[in-house]
């Protein structure tokens, strides 16, 4: 497996044609059951996010074929990331962002036939390599196998969130990147 980190916005934009079918295949599976509208939303979101300063994309290729990817970016000072919690009120000192404090893992996807071989862990490790943020956060569906996997990686539950009307409930998780 060959892992490549992309931080250049132009190069990251060129990868979208390869990312889309992997995203579509992974998130069509249970518990996500995402369809064409969800894939279109992903494509639209990626077109914005890959232009964010500090954006990082990691690709896992096997024989030139994309087996998985992960990407993330720093939370901006204007983020709404820490709102819409269903079960907790977070203190202001926890939610304050400055564009450097918190890195968010936006997506991590590995094709079904490549799982169980360390690809996800390698993508996660490469994504965070060199990130200077104090902490990393992500959201995951509670019923997804990835929820327990992130706990094994050291993430801790912040609370449950429903980021938009009609969205599923997600577990918001956080992990310190400081020694």
Image (cartoon, rainbow, N blue to C red):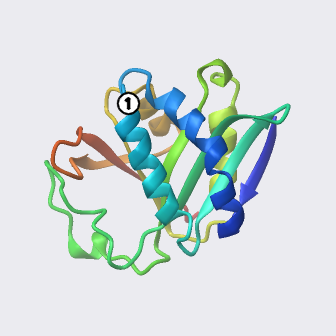
| Among the 4 quarters of the image, the one containing residue 122 | top right
113 in relation to 169, above or below: above
Q: Is residue 115 left or right of residue 165?
A: right
Provide residue 18's location: percent of width, then percent of height.
66, 42
Provide residue 160's location: percent of width, then percent of height.
23, 45
58 or 35, nearer to the observer: 35
Q: Is residue 124 visible?
A: no
Q: Name the outermost residue toward the right.
A: 63
The kind of secondary structure element at disc 1 is: loop
Mark 1 surroundings within 10 Å by alpha-carbon count, few (fewer than 14), some (14 through 19), many (20 or more): few
For image coordinates 22% across by 48% down, the residue present is 161
Provide residue 40's location: percent of width, then percent of height.
42, 45
Which quarter shows the C terminus? bottom right
Q: Is residue 171 left or right of residue 74?
A: left
Which quarter shows the N terminus? top right
Q: Is residue 13 left or right of residue 108?
A: right
78 in relation to 116, above or below: below
For image coordinates 27% across by 63% down, the residue present is 82
Q: How many discs appear? A: 1
45 or 76, nearer to the observer: 45
For image coordinates 21% across by 52% down, the residue present is 164
Q: Which residue is mark 1?
A: 35
Q: Is residue 141 visible?
A: yes
30 or 65, nearer to the observer: 65
């Amino acid at each position: 497996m060959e892992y490549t980190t992309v931080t250049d916005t132009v190069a990251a934009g060129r990868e979208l044609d390869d990312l889309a079918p992997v995203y579509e295949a992974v998130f069509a599976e249970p518990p996500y059951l995402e369809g064409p509208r969800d894939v279109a939303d992903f494509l639209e979101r990626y077109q914005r996010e890959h232009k964010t300063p500090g954006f990082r994309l990691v690709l896992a290729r096997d024989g030139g074929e994309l087996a998985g990817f992960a990407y993330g970016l720093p939370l901006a000072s204007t983020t709404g990331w820490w709102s819409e919690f269903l079960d907790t009120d977070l203190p202001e000192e926890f939610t304050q962002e400055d564009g450097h404090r918190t890195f968010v893992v936006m997506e991590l996807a590995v094709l079904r036939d490549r799982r169980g071989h360390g690809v996800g862990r390698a993508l996660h490790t490469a994504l965070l390599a060199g990130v200077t943020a104090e902490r990393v956060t992500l959201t995951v569906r509670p019923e997804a196998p990835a929820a327990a996997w992130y706990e094994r990686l050291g993430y801790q539950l912040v609370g449950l969130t429903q980021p938009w009307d009609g969205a599923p409930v997600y577990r918001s998780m956080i992990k310190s990147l400081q020694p």
